[in-house]
């Protein structure tokens, strides 16, 4: 006859055994799934669990070792539940091809970000291995698209793929509607620059990001580009004293690769002003804040495309001289694409030309800044993944508001150019 105590111990023993068996079965099943489908993740995340599991047999750390079997399933579960970001790429044109190149590099580097699906309305893009080449040398020329699920509709991809975020490499006029739709459907959104076709659309995106709690980040690459970040640091830390002047330039051949020629359709892209020049507009907002007024001259060369050449003076209260120029009709042989900046301060100058950043201190020797030459397209995605995971505390709403200010500034530039360069006051509503 069992006494109460013995019976209790027996039940406890049986329950423990069942729990252990379920835990072991769970561990075995998940481990098998990982080995079969995610060998890379298995090696990286689960091997440490197995090392802990083996500790008792080594005779060391007996206490830790004896509790190992109970936390292995937990580790397996946590690893499976997600440390990794599942990404869906939307738009496989020139920029989508560049992003895809970076997702392949992330896989090679064992980053916690994994592209699982690609969506493009143009089915030809999904069945071809050839990349769409833009004006920047940032993409592989060919891809194997077979490892990814293919979709022609973003909503369907989101509903089927259990994504953490979508990466929108879409024509500018689609940024706001598609980002809003994706956030409403419950995923975070990384969206290429510029933020949207209008500042009103930017405000709608911010409202939806706040309401849904979904993270939204804009791929304004120059903010993550080491030479531009170096200059921003000089300004913020006052290293060369007050900034006296700044000149920013971008220019190159006409973009002729775009889907339905949207880049050369003013209503869809905003022309060179909102597509290419906007990089420098955003940099100026980032470095110096909104000016009080602008004066812009612009020229239309290609029918229907908006301003193809622009030059703007940014008027600040402290009188510093800031100018930016862009021209995307430099179609003469052999030019390609170029971007540069020159910043002059009380105690020195920073000159970025031909990919080289020179530091010229007043009264000292000039030298080239020691920069590693980062891949900003790669780094911005990694930063976004960290933001989603809570590993990066930057205020993404403030960042969005700053990118929205960029569009407010671009709109003022367009208004000024429309009136032949009249000084146009920035109105922030
Ligand atoms: N950060 C940078 O340096 C940089 C450089 C170039 C372009 N961009 C930006 O990237 C974005 C895309 O430019 P691009 O040159 O790749 O254009 P693109 O025309 O080459 O590519 C756009 C792609 O979107 C697809 N598409 C259109 N509507 C769609 C929809 N509803 N759903 C899914 N796919 C759809 C098209 O088929 C096409 O493949 C633009 O906003 C542009 O300003 C950024």
Image: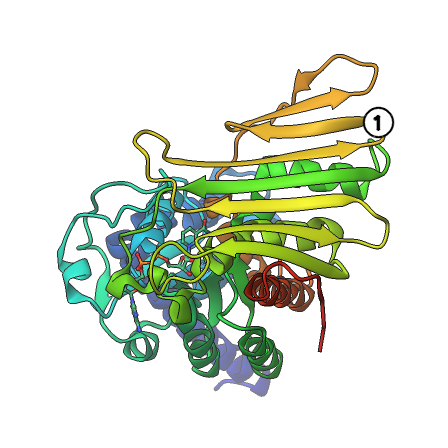
Picture quadrant of residue 263: bottom left
Taking depth in this image into account, of 210 and 19 the one nearest to the observer is: 210
Q: Is residue 99 visible?
A: yes
Q: Residue most toward the front? A: 420
Q: Horizontal placement of 20 versus 302: left or right?
A: right
Q: Is residue 393 visible?
A: no
Coordinates of residue 249 in the picture (x, y in percent): 55, 41
Identify the residue at horizontal 59%, vertical 61% (top origin): 420
Vertical arrangement, residue 227 with respect to residue 110, above or below: above
Coordinates of residue 95 in the picture (x, y in percent): 36, 53
Vertical arrangement, residue 159 with respect to residue 229, above or below: below
For label 1, the residue is 347
Taking depth in this image into account, of 292 and 127 the one nearest to the observer is: 292
Disc 1 crowd, CA 10 A, few/some/many (<14, 14-19, 20+) = some
Rendering quadrant holding ligand 1? bottom left
Vertical arrangement, residue 35 with respect to residue 90, above or below: above
Taking depth in this image into account, of 194 and 145 the one nearest to the observer is: 194
Q: Horizontal placement of 211 versus 125: left or right?
A: right
């Amino acid at each position: 006859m069992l006494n109460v105590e013995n019976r209790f111990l027996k039940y406890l023993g049986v329950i423990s055994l069942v729990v252990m068996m379920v835990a072991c079965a769970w561990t075995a099943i998940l481990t098998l799934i990982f080995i079969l489908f995610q060998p890379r993740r298995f090696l990286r995340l689960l091997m440490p669990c197995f090392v802990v599991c083996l500790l008792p047999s080594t005779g060391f750390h007996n206490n830790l070792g004896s509790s190992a079997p109970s936390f292995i399933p937990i580790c397996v579960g946590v690893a499976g539940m997600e440390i990794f970001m599942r990404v869906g790429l939307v738009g496989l044109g020139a920029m989508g091809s560049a992003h895809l190149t970076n997702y392949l590099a992330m896989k090679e580097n064992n980053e916690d970000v994994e592209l699982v699906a690609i969506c493009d309305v143009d089915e030809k893009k999904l069945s071809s291995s050839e990349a769409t080449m833009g004006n920047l040398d940032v993409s592989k020329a060919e891809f194997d698209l077979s490892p990814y699920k293919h979709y022609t509709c973003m909503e369907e991809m989101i509903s089927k793929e259990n994504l953490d975020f979508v990466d929108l490499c879409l024509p500018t006029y689609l940024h706001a509607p598609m980002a809003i739709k994706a956030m409403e459907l419950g995923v975070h959104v990384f969206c290429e620059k510029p933020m949207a076709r209008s500042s009103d659309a930017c405000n709608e995106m911010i409202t939806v990001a706040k309401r849904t709690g979904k993270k939204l980040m804009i791929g304004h690459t120059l903010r993550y580009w080491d030479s531009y970040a170096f200059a921003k640091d000089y300004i913020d830390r006052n290293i060369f004293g007050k900034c006296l002047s700044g000149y920013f330039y971008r220019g190159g051949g006409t973009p002729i690769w775009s889907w339905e020629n949207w880049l050369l359709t003013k209503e869809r892209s905003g022309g060179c002003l909102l597509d290419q020049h906007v990089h420098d507009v955003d940099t100026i907002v980032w470095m110096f804040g909104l000016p009080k007024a602008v004066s812009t001259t612009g020229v239309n060369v290609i029918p229907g495309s908006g301003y193809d050449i622009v030059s703007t003076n940014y008027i600040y209260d402290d009188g510093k001289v800031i100018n930016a120029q862009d021209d995307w009709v430099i179609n003469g042989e052999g030019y390609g694409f170029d971007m540069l900046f020159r910043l002059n301060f009380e105690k020195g100058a920073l000159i970025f030309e031909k990919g080289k950043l020179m530091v010229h201190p007043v009264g000292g020797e000039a030298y080239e800044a020691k920069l590693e030459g980062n891949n900003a397209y790669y780094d911005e995605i990694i930063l976004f993944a960290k933001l989603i995971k809570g590993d990066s505390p930057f205020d993404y709403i403030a960042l969005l508001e700053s990118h929205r200010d960029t569009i407010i500034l671009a709109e003022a530039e367009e208004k000024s150019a429309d009136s032949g360069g009249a000084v146009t006051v920035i109105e922030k509503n």
